[in-house]
Image (spheres, rainbow, N blue to C red):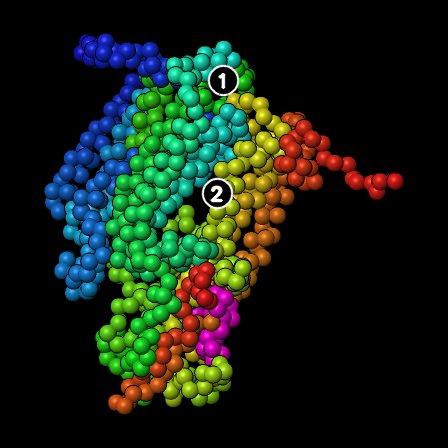
Amino acid sequence: MTQPAEGERVERAAALCFFVAMLAAIGLAITYWRGGDAQFEGVLLAVVTGGIGVGIVLWAKHFMPGGEVAEERETLASTDEEVAAFTEDFEAGETPLRSRRLLLTSAAGALTAFGAALLFPLRSLGPRPGGGLKRTAYAPGNVRVVQADGSPVRPSELPADGVVTVWPEDHTHDADAPTLLIRTRDSQDFTPRSGRGDWTVEGIVAYSKLCTHVGCPVGLYQAEEGLLLCPCHQSTFDVLDGARPVFGPAARSLPQLPLGVDDDGYLIATDDFSGPVGPGFWDRGR
Amino acid sequence: MLSRRLARWVDDRLGTAQFARTVLNKVFPDHWSFMIGELALYCFVILVLTGVYLTFFFDPSANETVYRGSYEALQGVEMTEAYRSGLELSFDVRAGLVMRQMHHWAALLFLASIVVHLGRVFFTGAFRRPRELNWMIGVTLLVLAMFNGFAGYSLLDDQLSGTGLRIAYSIALSIPLVGTWVTSLLFGGEFPGPDIIERLYVIHILLIPAAIAGLLTAHLAILVRQKHTQFPGPGRSEDNVVGTRLWPTYAAKALGLFFLVAAVVSFLGGVFQINPIWIYGPFDPAEVSSASQPDWYMGWLDGALRIMPGWETRAFGYEVPNPFFPGVLMAGLTFTALYAWPLLEARVTGDHAVHHLADRPRQRPVRTALGVACLAFYLVCFLGGASDVLAQTFGLSVNAILWTFRVAVVVAPLVAGWVAYRLCKELSARDGVPTASRVTWRQIPGRLRHGVGAEPEPDAEPAES
């Protein structure tokens, strides 16, 4: 252990640690009382706990019995006799049954049925999945597209390279419906997919904003190349070619929304998206 | 003395002296690496203490409200009660911010010490018989801690956590056959779902902490029952354990260590900002910012999602979405392999003996090399999760970086494993320590099927008829 002179020094050091901790604790109380401050609180708390910690460790290191001891290990496994005695006790006292099997199977049946019955309330946790994943609020057809504040969009309001996020009218909080309106440049070679020739209006094309990888909003438009980039996992889609994935983990094109113009000159969606939006699921194609 | 009389009083009624003496005399081998699991334990205690404080103020509700608190930049903004009470905790509850940040830092350190502790146990072979069960409990604790960390930062309903939940939703949705049901029942409907925050709250503050507390108790009880492993050395054998008694020195040092861990967490929580939800803003499902990185222990999964090539397959006429492979299959294989490792290793090496002496990593070149290769794999995945940040910081193309990672995720484990293997061989040759007998790849399938007793079949010669 420690020499007397050194021991006295260490003793004083440990006491000093506790003393500093005490002062810091008082400071902590004052800080809190004066209105609090995260930085001060954190640092003072660190001094309090650190002071106590160092004090205790010094105490333990220098003034408590040190040195190693060797402890024998006993065998963990029980002896054969012990196991036999246990088995005997475990199986003791049962009155012979006429049909042990009948009792066991019927009891097991009851417990299984009970367990199965207990699973049923799980069904209350959520609605049956299915249709909802494949439909959005655009489904009725001829729905106006509106911006976040609810205002409809005229084709002329969108400049070249312009990107606007829109929703079906009255559904601006729907998480499955955000849509990107993009006006491509006249100089860019936009090729519609077959059968989608009349889905654009004055060079404005509309795609679901939800990445087909894991559903992040595809937020970054590189107008020069006509590429949409998902900030989450860097999937990249070619706006000029049906939003085909050209890079990253996404495997499917962004679903396209067929656009039209209503009698008042505002943009509408003539029908729902070309497919289910967002991430894939097992029966998406069914 | 009062304490003696009190002890007597308890012992008269419970007969505790004998048991308490066993505990006091428990021997702890003195090696720094045996302390890491202890750090995890202390982090858990700090998590419970700070977490309880947070529950007094946090409101896990998805109800819409308008912000009227003291943070100017968000005045009048629509948000959920969950996010609002998170802001309130940060700005208007005294000591709220430091508690929140300490809670978050403690969670990061909790996971870090669990992972390092797991590495220590793996590389020293401390999982071998009779400790397989405690290894499995440990792996379960890792899984629970990861899940609870994720659930915790998902509660606040800020832009970053909402994005994380959306990704988790999509991964769960990708599970064949049951994905749509699982997500609907968990979230209460389609994403974002009306119920997820309240449910995660119950999971985060009750179910998982209770499970962790129970399993931790079992983990420690088994440790006491089986006694520690120890490194070989003079006077140390399979039949004893050499070290310091719990009482009083070790117990005092452990208490001191707890306070020191608390000091580190307090300092981090006070001085280093973490998860500034007021900068992220309330969750809006139509928005996301770049540089959306999860907490560090989820980074490997996020990176795997990015590195995975854009393949989507069909099986039996149904779709198997892309995130299924990195998000469900790889994660599932990772934890299955972790659980099964003690059994697999015993089967392949044929070593079913009881071991209380820990290996030095260099003595087991194959195990060490495999471990290092796995670490390299997960490290590349982890770095892959920062691909956009790397691209921005170094002005590189995201595509080039991602391709680098796609190559590295295959090459780096091979190189790292080979280097580790050579190093082990060199080091043990220099020490004059024998390494474990050689296992060739060709033997492994046979050993897994039949156990080690069956020799690998000799090369089949065409039989003469």
Amino acid on which disc 2 is placed: Phe
For the point 62% across and 36% down, the residue is B448
**From the viewer's perspective, is residue B388 above or below residue B31?**
below
The residue that mark 1 highlights is A77
Chain under callout 2: B
Which quarter of the image is occupied by the N terminus of chain B?
A: top left
Q: Position of residue B196 (x, y in %)?
A: 29, 53
Q: Position of residue B463 (x, y in %)?
A: 84, 40
Q: Which mark is residue B335?
A: 2
Residue range corresponding to the magenta coloring: A226-252
- Judged from the image, the secondary structure of the residue bearing numbered disc 2 is helix
Task: Specify whether residue A68 is painted magenta.
Answer: no
Q: Chain of mark 1?
A: A
- Distance of mark 1 from mark 2, alpha carbons? 29 Å
| Position above or below: A162 against B47 | below
Q: Residues within 10 Å of mark 2 (few under 14, many from 20)?
A: some
Residue at screen point 39% across, 44% down: B146
Question: Could you tell me the amino acid type at mark 1?
Answer: Ala
The front one of A150 and B54 is: A150
